[in-house]
Image: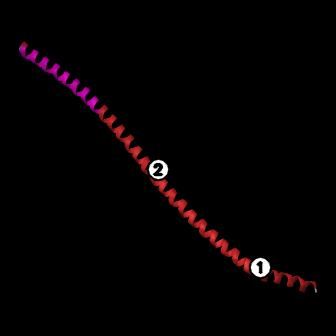
Amino acid sequence: MSKEAIRAIKQAEEQAQVLCRVATEKADEMRAQVEREGSAHCAEVERETEAECRAELDEIRARAEALMEKRRKEAKKEAEALADEARERMPDAVKMIVWGIIEKCQ
């Protein structure tokens, strides 16, 4: 082989090494860029998801409170109806108790 051919081969090898090093550096930069973008996107999705979950949870809490208030009112109304009925029957109950006592005492 001639010296020129050897020189050309060495030069091509050096260029290949440089190109390989440049490609590796570029790949590392691209990988770092993608990781940064991926992390930023992941963080954004997490923030959005947390906000959506908080909003849904707030809505569910509001509906639960409204339902509890409705049940509370219904229970109070039922309790008042039972108390009214008990008041109406009180005179009869007192008479039955008193007459029961009187009968036992005789």
Relative height, residue 30 to residue 46 (above, below): above
Q: Residue at x 82, y 83 (%)?
A: 95
- The region drawn magenta spans 4-31
Q: Residue 93: image x %, image y %?
A: 79, 81
Q: Quadrant of the N terminus?
A: top left
Q: Residue at x 39, y 40 (%)?
A: 43
Q: In the drawing, does residue 81 fall left or right of residue 104?
A: left
Q: In the drawing, does residue 17 fall left or right of residue 48?
A: left
Report the residue marked by disc 2. 54
Q: Residue 54: image x %, image y %?
A: 46, 50
Instruction: Give the colour scheme of this rendering.
Output: secondary structure
The answer for how far apart the CA atoms under marks 1 and 2 are is: 52 Å
Q: Earlier in the sequence, mark 1 or mark 2?
A: 2
Q: Main secondary structure of the magenta part?
A: helix
Q: Is residue 14 magenta?
A: yes
Residue 54 or 88: which is nearer the viewer? 88
Nearer the camera: disc 1 or disc 2? 1
Residue 13, located in which quarter of the rendered image? Answer: top left
Q: In the drawing, does residue 10 fall left or right of residue 66?
A: left
Residue 33, located in which quarter of the rendered image? Answer: top left
Furthest toward the right, the residue is: 106
SS type, badge 2: helix
SS type, badge 1: helix
Q: Residue 38: image x %, image y %?
A: 33, 38
Residue type, numbered disc 1: Met
Report the residue marked by disc 1. 90
Residue 23 or 75: which is nearer the viewer? 75
Q: Is residue 47 magenta?
A: no
Q: Residue at x 67, y 72 (%)?
A: 80
Residue 73, located in which quarter of the rendered image? Answer: bottom right
Relative height, residue 6 to residue 90 (above, below): above
